[in-house]
Structures are given as C-alpha cells and as structure tokens.
Image (tube, grey):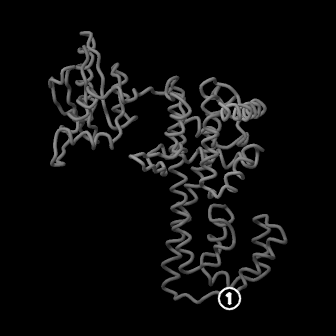
Amino acid sequence: MRYYLGVDWADQTHAVWVVDERGTKLTARTVPHTAEGLSEWGRELDEWRAQGIELWAAIERPEGRVVDFLLDHGVVVYPVNPKALDRARDRFRQSGAKDDPFDARVLADFLRTDHAHLHVLQPSSEAAQELKLLTEDYQRQIRQQTRLVNQLTITLKAYYPRALEVAELTTALARAFLEAYPTPEAVIALTERQWQRWARAHRLSEARTLELWNVLQRPQLPVPAHVVRAKARLMRTLVAELAAVVAAVSEYREAIEDFFARMPTAQWIRTLPIGDHGITAPTLWARLGDAPERWESFRHLQAQAGAVPVTKRSGQQRFVQFRFACDKPLRYIVDQVAFLSLQRNEWARAYYDQQRVRGHSHRQALRALGAKWLKIIFVMWKRQASYDDQYHLASMARQLLRQPQKKIA
C-alpha cells in the first residue's frame, strides 16, 4: 500500500494533504515549523511506515529543512515545478482561487496520477551538499559586493568622479586612497611631495605614481559644499561595508578551494581545460552533485543547464526559441567553463570561431560550446574519469568518418 502526501511548505506552518492509491482523502493537517510540530508529524510518518505503508511526497522545492525531514523519515520525495502545479490547479478549480490546503491537495493528487512524469529526488552526499551551500553563499557575497561597488560608484560620480580613476573600487589601494583623500578639496590641497610619500607607502611604481598625479591634477567640476559633506559621509559608510564583503569573498574562495581539494572528485574535474585553480570547477561539481542516477543522459543535463533551445511544432509551423526554464546557476557556470576553455583548448576555440563565422553572437556561440562541453562533462561525471583531449579528438574524427556513410545510406 502507498500513501501520497502533498506538502505546501511555508515559513511558519506547512499544509499537508494525504490520499491513498484510490484518491481517497485520509487526513489533512497543518504542521507547525517547530521542533514539537515536526516531531509529532514524524511519529505519524514512522507509524505508517511501520505498518508497511510506502510514503511518497510531492513538494515544490527540491531542498530545505522540510525536504531533509521527509528524507530522514524514509519518505520518497518528488519535487514539483511550480509551473506544473499552477496548471494542475485547473483540474480542481476553474476560478483561479487558491490557498495552502488546496495546493497540498493538488500536489497529493498530482503525484498520485502523474508520478510517472516526475523525477524522484536523489540527494547528493553530505560533502557535495556542503560544497553546494558554500558555492551558493559565495555567489551571494559576490552579488552583495557588486551592489556595493555600484552604490559607491554612483556616490563618487555625484561629488568626486576623479577618485574612480585611481584604482578598482574592490582593491585595497582604492579604499586607502578614499580614506586618505575623501573629498576633492583634499586632492586640491595635496602637494606633489605629499603624494609621492603616500604612493611610496603603498608601493606604487614611479611610473604609476606620476600617471596618477597627472590624473589628479586635472580640473574638476565644482560641487556644492553641502553635497560634498553628505556624499562623503555615505562614501565612508559604503567603503567600510565593501571592505568587509571583499574580505568575506576572499575567505569564501579560499575555503571552497580547500574543501574541494580534499574531495576525490577534484582529481578528475580539475583536468578540464579551465585552469588548475579557482572556484569554477568546484561550483560546476556542486551543481552536478554525486547522486548516481541524477542525470539520465547528456541531453537531460543540457536541458537543465539551458544550453539547448526549445522546439515547438504545431501543424506546418516550427519554432525554435531560447530555453528560459532551467537551472540558472548551472547555466552561468557552464558559460564560465566554455569561456575559460577558449584560451586553453584548441578545438574549443575552433568550434567557437566556427559558430561566429556562421553569424551567431558571442553568447550564442558560447552557449553552443557549453552544450558540447556538457556532453563531455556528463561522460566524466558518469564514469568518474579525467578529461583526455586526445581521446575526445579521436572521437570527433570517428564521427566525421561516419557522416558520409549516413548520407549514402
């Protein structure tokens, strides 16, 4: 016997709807997201399993504390795309009305009738999950750094654009310069000897010192004093925040590289022609995971990464369009892999140039190259094998030899 659970998760409470194999409602409840609430629900799940009842659950998210809780209690979890759930609602209501218990009911019945079209969740190992969390948090820090850099750039343009020409805002040199000379008036009062002393203290070459001195001596547009005072205060706040985020980004990068180096996977994933260091390889592996049956084929991986288009046919009409629905972080890291391989791999560069000659844009050519790399990466992931450039070139040659035979046949 099997019970189907629909779980509509939320921050405070989770709506749960349970049906049997015939679709008969067994129970509907609300589970508080507390230790007591989850413990009580867990006891109910364990009692069902002790009676020999198989438990399958449908939920909109593929990860999180609720998913971990279900897996810990032996429940088979099926993630459901929110778009699929939205369309399944129309089976039960035409008005478009919805609430949490209703969504839980839809999930339970959708799983009961359409589970053959869904993929069971296969969690990766704890090490792979931790690596994924580290890389995701690193990307959040990068986005925060970008936001602060943009805010600081806008602030400096409002009252002190000359400071933007000194150095990149994420560097220690730029922060030191802004702390020493926070306003245009501070630069105007600066003498050449004082500047040379400051430059030597920050280990600038003579050529760079002279170049920056000439930049700072250029005329600047006058700015009202009240604007300078207000924006200088904001600048100091943003610089302090940026310094903390830049340090966090560096710490995360080092932590990810050290963590990945201790994983056996690093021995073969690092053989990709994308550099021996950096977080591109760890991030790629974190998105792939190590669940044995997660990826059915390279086409499945390509579709999930958004590297291949979507084809729509209706009668005599045929449309090929960009694939918007995909794993966005995976798409981004595959683009990174394709881009880095351009400088380190001859066939990748030749294929990219061929795509550009055919009239494709840089992004289109890079995406096509990424699709090629995903075929190789899938084989590496499946076999836990290193990348062999000679083996791949030999495979390409064999494919070229087979093409005339296909045409003749």
255, 303: nearer the viewer: 303
User: In this rendering, is residue 160 above or below 383?
Assistant: below
Residue 320, horizontal then vertical, whole percent:
49, 50
Residue farthest right in this picture = 206
Q: Quarter of the image holding residue 56?
A: top left
At a point 55% along the width and 53% down the height, the residue shown is 142
At a point 56% along the width and 33% down the height, the residue shown is 298
Residue 24 appearing in the image:
yes
172, 194: nearer the viewer: 172
User: Which amino acid is tagged 1?
Assistant: Pro
Would you call the spot at circle 1 few (<14 residues within 10 Å), some (14-19), or many (20 or more)? few
At a point 26% along the width and 13% down the height, the residue shown is 53
Residue to which mark 1 is pinned: 219
Tag count in the figure? 1
Q: Quarter of the image holding residue 173?
A: bottom right
Residue 271 appearing in the image:
no
User: In this rendering, is residue 329 above or below 128?
Assistant: below
Residue 386, horizontal then vertical, whole percent:
70, 28
Residue 59, horizontal then vertical, whole percent:
31, 34
